[in-house]
Amino acid sequence: MDFTKTKTELGKLIGEKKVIQKNDGTMDDALFDSYGTDRTKVYPPNYQVLVFPESTEDVASIVTYAYQNGISIVPSGGRTGYAGGAVAKDGEIVISMSKMNQVMDFDPFLGTLHIQAGMITKNLHKEAEERGFYFPVDFAATGSSHIGGNIATNAGGVRVVRYGLIRDWILGLTVVTGKGEVFRFNGEILKNNTGYDLKHLFIGSEGTLGIITEAVVKLTKPPKDIRVIFLAVPEYKNILEIFKETHNFDLPLLAFEFLTDYCLDKVKEHLGVPDPFRAPSKYYVLMEFEVNNETDEEKLYSILESITEKELITDGSIAQNSRQNETFWKYREGISESLSLAYTVHKNDISLPLRNMEAFLGEMSALLTQKYQGFSIALFGHIGDGNLHLNIVKPKDLSDEEFFKQCKQVDPEMFQLIQKFKGSISAEHGIGLLKKDYLGFSRSQGELDTMKAIKLAFDPKGILNPGKVL
């Protein structure tokens, strides 16, 4: 491919300053490469042309050009993914959405924001807050992830147990298909019973059906007040008992998270935070509740008293203010960063029915002990919605190549266990490049064939995020 010609022709379509070619003196090579990858380390980026559209029309022009010339495209958001979904490894054009970060409209009656897909998730939170509303989808990467990427992976995060997935908060979408067509799915109304709701095909499609350029997101009222309870738990089975205990109290549960002592040690090491309790424990649980009045405050202490009396915990503390809330959350939200920046990690993001969780973990523990001798296991997740993040940390004396080779050998056995216990091989990180070979553990052949037919309808030349998902 003549990349210089591609740069010149794209520059004529959307503006020269919006198109960069590697080594043209415009951008440092390391920064350039970073737009073609995510937080995985399996596939190095390999591409030559990077574009920065500023509107849906720009994106449509780029995709139309690519369609006419048979050039593949990789959409690039905040690149916070862990499945290789944003990796450009085969000379694709990379479309960074970072310049498309504006609020386009606000409807105070319906309670919606119309935004461009490149808006950082944390900025969406601020935009909603400034208007007296609340956008409830939240997770550790909100400070860098883009809302378009969140939608493309149907992100969940820490408050799914109360608010659901991001799919539940999308009223409208604007997408550009693999032929350069622009589809605008109306987000101005709540009721729209006019046949197939096609926007849901693009939510969770990881950029393989179309590039999301705009979204209309629903907002809600913010919680009046929030309190966090942090617990030291001696056994895993106690965690599920604690979760069941929360059902006995009329208090809105916003989040229910857990982590192991290994994860806590890595967060302390990386962030320099102190031990949360006087004595260490094997597991830790973080619960977040909405508190509206003094009676609710009393219920918090009733919960802590109940689980203490039943000997489900060895220690526990209730945050007394917002600052202490934030401190408790650091122990949970600092895990991914602490692992990813300091270690090479093989990540598995899985989900299971809560009632099958303990049996699965028992068999999985035996498998990992047998197959991953000498490897460290970091286990944490959104236990309230059945989502586990299982991280295998590479030993220092093992090469990355050999590490990932060994991990790939054991993955199918792990996925067989997930299938046995009626779970999913990917809860919220998506399929990308890393899990595409294993999609059959969660999808039937009929489903896969239908997905391929849908892909063909929206992207007949297969130029959108090629090699991902299917």
Image (tube, rainbow, N blue to C red):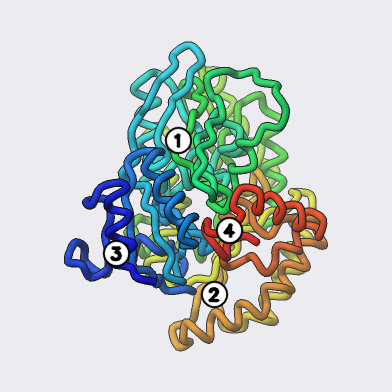
Above-or-below relation of 305 to 349:
above
**Are the two marked residues, 4 and 1, in contact with CB atoms closer than 8 angstroms?**
no
Q: Quadrant of the C terminus?
A: bottom right
Distance between the Cα atoms at labels 4 and 3?
27 Å
**Residue beneath the point at 38% across and 69% down:** 47
Q: Amino acid at mark 1?
A: Glu
Q: Amino acid at mark 4?
A: Lys
Q: Amino acid at mark 3?
A: Phe
Distance between the Cα atoms at labels 2 and 1?
41 Å
Q: Quadrant of residue 362?
A: bottom right
Q: Which residue is mark 4?
A: 461
Q: Which residue is mark 1?
A: 214
**Residue beneath the point at 58% across and 68% down:** 434
Q: Position of residue 168 (x, y in %)?
A: 61, 32
Q: Which residue is mark 2?
A: 376
Label 3: which secondary element? helix
First in residue order: circle 4 vs circle 2: 2
Label 2: which secondary element? strand
Distance between the Cα atoms at labels 3 and 1?
25 Å
